Each structure stands twice: as structure tokens, then as C-alpha cells.
Amino acid sequence: MLYAKEISKATLEVNGKTFQLPVYMGTEGEMALDIRNLRAQTGLITYDPGFGNTGACASNITYIDGEKGILRYRGYDIADLTEHCNFLEVAYLLVHGFLPNKEEYAAFSSMMNQHSMLHEDMRHFYNLFPEHAHPMAMLSAMVVTLSTFYPELEHSANEAIDSMVTRLLSKLRTIAAFAYKKMKGHPIVYPRPDLSYCDNFLNMLFYTPVNGYKPDPVITKALNQLLILQADHEQNCSSTVVKAVGSSDANLYASISAGICALWGPKHGGANQAVIEMLEDIQNNQHGDVIGALERAKSKEDPFRLMGFGHRVYKTYDPRAEIAKKICHKVLDYLGVNDPLLDIAQRLEAGALSDQYFQERHLYPNVDFYTGISYRAIGIPTNMFTVLFALGRLPGWIAQWLEMRDASEHRIYRPRQLYVGPKLHSVKAD
């Protein structure tokens, strides 16, 4: 196990027999019961729907303390990284395990530029998607298509990791921008060698032959920060899917494509889109009635739910949400935007935080609650929000995939189940 040591034994008694199970401790004091030999020793399996109490691996990438509201990448606090680093530096940190020096960063940026273009044949694929195609569908399809254009990187040796990582990081940004242009019916804008990662993305989104768009450093910094907030989050749904697909020795492109599909769901990355749609519904159909919305959310008979509240891990305020809220205010103040959805969001937060119902259930705002309002002010449409989440989460997916691939305990993902179906039937008897 990575950085884990056995500290004691736990005793399990089953049908009068006792079994000793190792207990491990991680570097931050987390403890885990080793049940790898449980079925072989006892004939039992664990029953844990949703895997909320199951540790599928040991990892040295991301640390979360849900009770204290702590999030760290490779030992660096999320607030420290968003304040002092850009997204590419954090991507390098996640993949390589350390922040780059000037020379390493320059080489990484140069490779990002080198791999930023898409094969021209891939451009034509966009014309085959229907006009109403969701950009997440396009994103997933185009990523898995990369494996047909760059098959030499399907099973890259360690020395080719930089090439594999930068190709995906750079091309996903271009794929996302091209999907946006497809939706808008605008001509595609190619990446430029003189622009940074986020500047390039904003330019590919918003430049047209008639507007002379120039990236704004304040908006660029905000985008860097928002992508950093979403860069990794331990063994979440999409990261687990990436690793599950990769555990079969499927290539990185297929694994990331699957992760994009998992992220799309409204209970995962799609929640930032769902938050905006909820706020718009409160504004347009509930006349801005925040108190009424909170009461509806508490009712078991009403299907209405507060999107962007609560988290499977955090039992206190999501540390990313606090930062996202500050970014949101900075962006809107800088742009001079008076968005009524921000007022509704803040009143919802204040109402929920002072309500015993939400307090008892640890329903605090999560990272999705304020990010969409910032993206909306920047000019990014609602159905692109989850695409930006995927763009931010990509370095975490890659880091998790590489760690899984290189782990000494690497095995194909194959959970067990508790069968509750019918017993053996006879066809003749029926």
C-alpha cells in the first residue's frame, strides 16, 4: 500500500470462529480495515451500496477531510493553490507529484502549444452532430476518437507520459471550444501559440471575425481558479469510472471518455448546470420566493430539491464553495453585472444555513453552487458548464489513471453483490 502501515488487528467473529483483519493507517491518520481476504477466510462479502464506506485503493494524490472541510492536492491546500498557481501548474502537480520549476513549466507549456491542434479530419466530425447535440456528448465522442488518430500513445511507456498528458489536456480544450462554436454556428477559431492555456480557451470560445476579442487578465485568472477548484476530488464517481475502465487495460482515451459520461450526470458534474436551472425556476416560476423553495425542498411529497447543496464527503461547508463564492463576487463586480440569480443564491444559502432541517443533514453549499453564476457572467452558456468541469477535472483523472496503472495492487475492478433474486426454477415445472 502507498504510505500505509499496519497498526493493529481487528477481530471478527462469525459463527463462533474468530478472524484477524489488518488495520492500516494513512499519513493523515485515516484508518482502514483490510478485507481483501474476507471472502476467502469467512465466505462473507461486505454490503456497501454506493461504496460510501469502501476504500478501493491507497492514493497519494488528494486528501479530503469531510468533517473539517479540508481539501489538498499532493499536500497543498486548495486555497493556497488557487491563490498562487495557475491551472497548468496544478495540472503538472497532480500528474507529476510536484510543482514545476521555471524550466519544467516552460517545457510543459511548449508541449501544450505543440499538441493544441486537432487533426483536420476530426473537424468534419462536428458537422455530423445534430444542431441540438449536448456538448458533453460531443466531448466524450471526440475524446475516444483520439485513440484512432494517435494509437501509438494507447500504452505509452513512462518516458512518453508528458506527451500523452499534454496531448489530452491541450486537445480537450480545443475539442470543447470547437463544440461551442458548433452550437453557435460560428466559424472555428484555432489555438494561438502566443496565448496561455486559459487565454487560448477563452479566445477560441469568444473570438469572431467581427468582434476582435481580447482575453481579459481578470477573467483569465478567474477561469484558472475555477478549473483548479475542480481539478481532482479523490475517488469520486467519474474518477472511479476512469479507473474502472482503465483497470481492464483499456487505453487512456477510452477511460477519460467514460469519465466524461459519468461527470455529465446531474448528481455529479452536471449539478452546476442544474443549479442555474433551479435558480432560474425560482426566479421565473416561483417569483423569487426563497422561503417557499426551502419549504418545498423539505417536503417529501414535493420532487423539488436544492441543487448545489450537500455532498457525500463534506459534512461542513465545502472549502471549494467558499473560494468559488469569492470568485463569483469578484467576476460580477469587475464586469459590472447585476445578476438576480446571485441574489437568489445568497438568500437560499442564508436560509438553509439558518434552518435546523438543513443543519441536521449537513446540507451546505458545494462547489457547484456558485461556479455556474461566474461562468454565466463570463458569457459561457449553461450547457457548457459541465464541459468546463471536465476540462478542470482532466488532470485529476489522468493522475488517478496513472496511479492505478502503476500500483503494485493493480487489479481489474470487479465488485461482488448480494443476490436477492428468485431461486432455481425448472423450465418443465413452470
Image (cartoon, grey):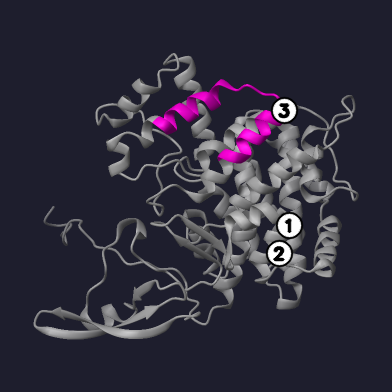
Residue 115, image x, y percentages = 82, 57
- Sequence-wise, which precedes: disc 3 or disc 2? 2
Question: Mark 3: few, some, or many residues within 10 Å (few <14, many ≥20)?
Answer: few
- Which mark, by number, is residue 88? 1
Q: Is residue 200 left or right of residue 228?
A: right
What is the span of residues highlighted in magenta in the rendered image?
Answer: 325-350
Pick whichever, 12 or 331, lies toward us: 331
List the residue tagged with mark 3.
335
Magenta span includes 339: yes
Q: Is residue 269 above or below residue 96?
A: above
Q: Is residue 19 left or right of residue 375?
A: left
> Can residue 154 be seen from the camera position used here?
yes
Question: Mark 1: few, some, or many residues within 10 Å (few <14, many ≥20)?
Answer: many
Q: Helix or strand or loop: what does disc 3 sit on? A: helix
Which one is in front in this view, the residue at disc 1 or the one at disc 3? 3
Magenta span includes 252: no
List the residue tagged with mark 2.
92
Q: Are marks 2 and 1 in contact (CB under 8 Å)?
A: yes
Real-space CA distance between mark 2 and mark 1, rounded to the nearest whole angstrom: 6 Å
Residue 366, image x, y percentages = 47, 44
> Can residue 130 be seen from the camera position used here?
no
Q: Helix or strand or loop: what does disc 1 sit on? A: helix
Real-space CA distance between mark 3 and mark 2, rounded to the nearest whole angstrom: 31 Å
| Mark 1 residue type | Leu
Quadrant of residue 398 within the rendered picture = bottom right
Q: Helix or strand or loop: what does disc 2 sit on? A: helix
Pick whichever, 430 or 89, lies toward us: 89
| Mark 2 residue type | Tyr
| Mark 3 residue type | Leu
Which one is in front in this view, the residue at disc 3 or the one at disc 2? 3
Real-space CA distance between mark 1 and mark 3, rounded to the nearest whole angstrom: 25 Å
